[in-house]
Amino acid sequence: MPDQLSASKLPVVIIGAGLAGLTVALHLAETQPVIVLAKRQLEEAATAWAQGGIVGVLGNDDSIGSHVRDTQEAGAGLVDEHTAEFIARHSARAVQWLVERGVPFSPDPDGPLGLHLTREGGHAVRRIAHAADATGKAIHDVLLDEVKRHPNISMRERWMAVDLITDRHLRKGGATSANTQRCHGVYALDIETHRVETLAASAVVLATGGVGKVYRYTSNPDTATGDGIAMAWRAGCRVGNMEFIQFHPTCLYHPQERSFLITEAMRGEGAILRLPDGTRFMPSHDERGELAPRDIVARAIDFEMKKHGLDHVWLDATHLGEDFLKEHFPTIHARCLSLGIDIAKQFIPVVPAAHYTCGGVVTDLQGRTDLPGLYAVGETTYTGLHGANRLASNSLLECVVLGRTCADDIAAQSPPAGPTLPGWDESQVSDADEEVVISHNWDELRLVMWNYVGIVRTTRRLERALHRIKLLRSEIDDYYAAFRVSRDLLELRNLVDCAELIVRSALSRQESRGLHYSRDYPRTLPVSFPTILSKKPKKRDAWLP
């Protein structure tokens, strides 16, 4: 029989060790025990890959209203104004909190808080606090060091969540619960020992990031497999706006570096997109040129590549000068130079790549999902902030602001005594005999998504994708039911769930808006609404967006 587990003082279990998860952990740990799960090395979170910076409404030439307007314009009519205003209003506090933690932002003695502010596409003014061109890593390193030293936080490296434990598992295991429906914990795989353990929790926080790895080309790390979105969906939570996958316009095109990002800030400082003959093309697509929102720039590059039969276009930063590039973009300068590209003298080959998931698990501004006891923060979520397209550098800001409100809400709760949870049952499965099936299905899924559900879509392509995804799901479900779980199998299972959510959302949107562009529906409707998917109709909670 499976082990029976219970606990009198339950920890909060946070799944994910990026900025969102670490922010929640640091705010919570003063009052209660916290467990943070990281399915790979602690340093491998997507946060560490973020180059540009974090928005802070700090300057005398800036205002909360201006930031909200820029967010709304980038979001193409689907931004929730209350959410945007709330996060903008707390942006200065968020940046100040990071400064107090010791994050080494690029200084400017004359700047607000002594910080140098840069500008990125879609922003009316300079409002991006940054640490040269490696802001995410600078923030992540500082917070990770603080979390590691905190006596009330347990970090579990190379642990992956398998599924959330809800009342469904209690009924299945013969246990009873006073709750009608609640998240009680999580089944988690210790990747080193291959053992699945049952972690009871007073609350579970999903901070697993996005789903970029569902595409063949992405700027995301290997961790971005949509784990939180898939687990929440399987547990009965709604998801929203999954059709809006942001493709970053400028990922380095090089056989040795398939996921290296060329930051938005480089175009903010004056870098120019060019065709092979040197022609600048962005002004013919948008009057804002290279500073247009990412969806417009990515579609323009995609158009020019298809028109001219190109594998990539070029980003020209040579006129900025070697000293400027070394000072402001040292990471990019060094990485490109190691690959034989001197960006002070040569154009940079770039191509769009899947970058950010603008939809996700539906939450409110405290991170609460449809399932009591389950919270979500960061790229895993749909809060209404990003609408149909994320404004550059709003992502790190959302993590810090809502990471704090999520922690505050959890700390204010008095959760009921945890029920006895059934342990993980492996009595009906065996070791996998052909793991090559996983890699083949993974490759097929990513290729289908890239070819049929990319920057430009059609109804026929989406229907073809959905057909293939359903066949893959059947194979993956059979494999999952027959064999012991592994990280690769769990990631593939989550990716196929997310792929179907993306396609179903895209098929339901019969217009082109923001990041979703359909050749069959090229016009933008005068009025539109978020795409909310639910497994079954539910009465809408007043506090959810």
Image: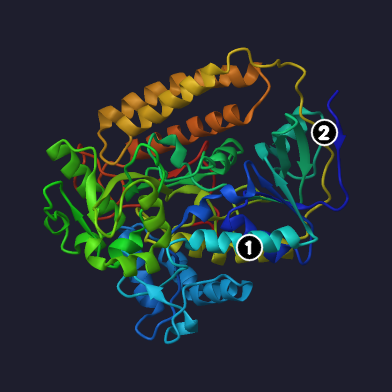
Could you say where residue 359 lies in the image, as x and y percent from the top left? 44, 48
| Figure label count | 2
Please rate how many residues cluster around mark 1, counting C-alpha atoms within 10 Å: few if below 14, some from 14 to 19, many from 20: many
Query: 276 or 480, which is in the foreground?
Result: 276
Could you say where residue 247 lies in the image, as x and y percent from the top left? 34, 47
In whole angstroms, how far apart are the C-alphas of marks 2 and 1? 39 Å
Q: Residue at x 76, y 62 (%)?
A: 150
Q: Please tell me the numbered disc located at residue 143.
A: 1
Q: For mark 2, give the secondary structure.
A: loop
Q: Amino acid at mark 1?
A: Leu
Visible in this render: residue 357? yes
- Please state if 35 lies on the left or on the right of 532 as rendered: right
Q: Is residue 381 above or below residue 67?
A: above
Q: Amino acid at mark 2?
A: Ala
Q: Please tell me the numbered disc located at residue 244.
A: none
Q: In which quadrant is the N terminus drawn?
A: top right
Visible in this render: residue 381? no
Query: 486 or 228, which is in the foreground?
Result: 486
Residue depth check, mark 2 versus mark 1: number of the one nearer the observer: 1
Q: Is residue 228 above or below residue 145?
A: above
- Please state if 363 lies on the left or on the right of 34 as rendered: left
Q: On the image, numbered disc 2 is attached to which residue?
A: 175
Please rate how many residues cluster around mark 2, counting C-alpha atoms within 10 Å: few if below 14, some from 14 to 19, many from 20: some
For the residues bearing labels 2 and 1, Cβ distance under 8 angstroms: no
Residue at far right of view: 8
Could you say where residue 185 lies in the image, as x and y percent from the top left? 73, 43
Q: Is residue 215 above or below residue 296?
A: above
Query: 23 or 164, which is in the foreground?
Result: 23
Q: Which quadrant of the figure has residue 500? A: top left
Q: Residue at x 70, y 34 (%)?
A: 189
